[in-house]
Image: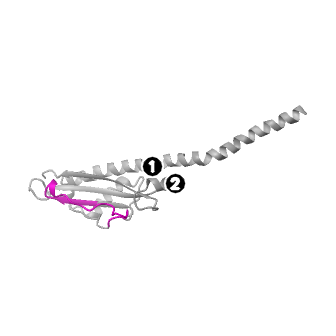
């Protein structure tokens, strides 16, 4: 009888671990996926930052202007930098280059409207001129990417593009005065 009771008590203990795991597992996996997704977003943001720094240097030094780089060619340069992790789809990757006469006159449209929708006017390409001539030598390069969030519950707190969209706009911008060339 003791053996039978000892066997039953052993089985009850092994079953409790499965029940405890079933209760804790959803929270554990949700947190694990949220951490992974957050890491991916920050990694993608870092890639975007480096792409803007590298490609905006072409404008700042006058290489883009001297070689008559078009908007499509500049987009290709940015895409070559980010294609490791991000899509070059024009609906997801937004590139906005604007030039100004001085820092006081900088004025560019916001990336998102009040409802969290993308601004359709984020498609300018004005690389500006040389700072030697005194023209439009102040340049702002903004590159933004629409990131789709997948982790449930997490997405509703991390999104910034309209309630329920499950999307986050990540981006980087560089503002500089063109060098004399």
Is 134 positioned to the left or the right of 63 in the image? left
Q: Nearer the viewer, residue 98 or 158?
A: 158
- Residue furthest to the left in view is 133
Residue drawn at (70%, 44%), measured in percent from left and top?
19
Q: Nearer the viewer, residue 30 or 177?
A: 30
Residue drawn at (31%, 60%), measured in percent from left and top?
111
Which comes sooner in the sequence, label 2 or label 1? 1
Q: Which residues are magenta?
A: 96-119
- Quadrant placement of the N terminus: top right
Q: Nearer the viewer, residue 77 or 30?
A: 30
User: Label 1: which residue?
Assistant: 40
- Residue 106 placement (x, y as % from top left): 19, 57
Labelled disc at residue 21: none
Q: Is residue 27 magenta?
A: no
Q: Is residue 111 magenta?
A: yes
Give the secondary structure at mark 2: loop
- Residue furthest to the top in view is 2
User: Label 2: which residue?
Assistant: 153
Residue drawn at (46%, 59%), measured in percent from left and top?
166
- Residue 76 placement (x, y as % from top left): 32, 60
Give the secondary structure at mark 1: helix
Which of the 4 image quarters holds residue 63?
A: bottom left
Mark yes or no: residue 127 visible.
no
Q: CA distance from mark 2 to mark 1?
A: 17 Å
């Amino acid at each position: 009888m003791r053996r039978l009771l000892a066997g039953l008590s052993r089985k009850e203990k092994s079953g409790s671990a499965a029940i405890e795991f079933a209760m804790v597992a959803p929270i554990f996996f949700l947190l694990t996926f949220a951490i992974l997704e957050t890491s991916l977003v920050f990694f993608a943001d870092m890639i975007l930052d480096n792409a803007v720094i590298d490609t905006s240097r072409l404008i700042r030094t006058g290489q883009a202007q001297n070689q008559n780089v078009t908007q499509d060619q500049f987009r290709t340069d940015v895409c070559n930098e980010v294609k490791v992790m991000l899509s070059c789809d024009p609906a997801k990757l937004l590139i906005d280059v604007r030039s100004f006469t001085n820092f006081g006159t900088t004025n560019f449209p916001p990336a998102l409207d009040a409802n969290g929708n993308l601004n359709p006017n984020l498609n300018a390409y004005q690389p500006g001129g040389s700072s030697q001539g005194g023209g439009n030598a102040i340049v702002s390069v903004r590159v933004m990417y629409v990131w789709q969030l997948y982790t449930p519950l997490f997405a509703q707190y991390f999104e910034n593009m309209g309630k329920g969209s499950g999307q986050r706009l990540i981006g980087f911008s560089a503002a500089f005065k063109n060098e004399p060339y």
